[in-house]
Amino acid sequence: MLLYFIKRLAGAVPVLIVVSGIIFALMQLAPGDAVTMLISDEASEADKARIREAWGLDRPPFIQFLNFLGNALTGDFGMSFRYKMPVIEIVMERLPATIELAVAATLIAVGVGVPLGVLAAARPGTAWDAIASAFSFAGISMPNFWLGILLILLFAGYFNILPSGGREPWGLGVEHVTGFLIIDSILAGRWDALGAALKYLALPAIVLGTNMTGIITQMTRAQVLDALREDFVMTARSKGVSEARVLWRHAFRNAMVGVVTIIGLEFGMLLSGAMIVETVFAWPGIGSLLITGISSRDFPLIIGLVLVYTGMFIVMNLLIDLIYTLIDPRIRMN
């Protein structure tokens, strides 16, 4: 297994190089001058030339890319034009907020979507099946920004029971040890802070997880229905196994391979697709950071964030492969 993971990680290196090359080329082709982020518009041409030389922007693009790759191998993704800080420090400061949001959204989606899909598959053609299908189609169809604004108006504006944006109230006073506010609140024994963190997390997590809930519901329903038609299920029923055991022990377990695949892929999509939700709810994650980087032409920050997203997708695929072997022992790493 260790050899398998080493091979997969080694295979990820060319992917990261190609992705970084594509993003670097696109940044070079994008309109605008990055020097404007480093110096006032009223600066003289001599000052601009001095800044270009100091930041290496006067060199040919290919040389700049090779320098970037060389530095990236040591964990140095360059300095942010906008924040005047190392990109890796900015990303690591914001990354826990995005992961926390994506994990919460995934828990909501799995907690609602899987039971709903199993229920629909166990009773096909009934009212339960129709309700589950309608719920899942509605979840898939609703745009995140529209649902986010609707929930803000409802729960923050009309009922006034949940905050409309941000990650924590002002002056919460929890020391950021891990960067994950929920974990840090538990470590500090601050249950009031934990409650506040969950309140701030609720609306963006629901919005981000709604689309995933619909997809998981549909996938679970389809996979369980297929499994219920297999010969081993008929054999189990003929032996007098209870319907609940047939459903959960035999059909659901065999359907989990497909469901886990979609959960893993959707989790990767949540990490990269949280930009709109983070922007709507002013959530301080890397999604809103990428929006800021694009709007300000902060090239080092954009490339660093895209590489982080790519790396997370690769790690998620590795974890999915590992989970496959735990669900179905017939699947081997080789």
Image: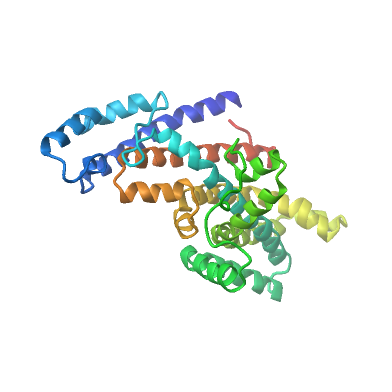
Quarter of the image for the C terminus: give it. Answer: top right
Asked where in the image residue 247 lies, by quadrant, the reply is bottom right
- Please state if 269 lies on the left or on the right of 155 as rendered: left
- Please state if 128 lies on the left or on the right of 99 as rendered: right
Farthest-out residue, left: 45
Front position in the image: 296 or 225: 296
Q: How many marks?
A: 0
Residue 191 in the image: above or below residue 333? below
Name the spot of residue 237 as percent of width and height, x first. 82, 58
Residue 293 in the image: above or below residue 151? above
Asked where in the image residue 229 lies, by quadrant, the reply is bottom right
Front position in the image: 295 or 184: 184
Name the spot of residue 280 as percent of width and height, x first. 47, 60
Farthest-out residue, right: 240
Name the spot of residue 123 as percent of width and height, x first. 73, 69
Front position in the image: 120 or 143: 143
Q: Is residue 328 visible?
A: no
Name the spot of residue 2 as percent of width and height, x first. 59, 24
Residue 326 in the image: above or below residue 227? above
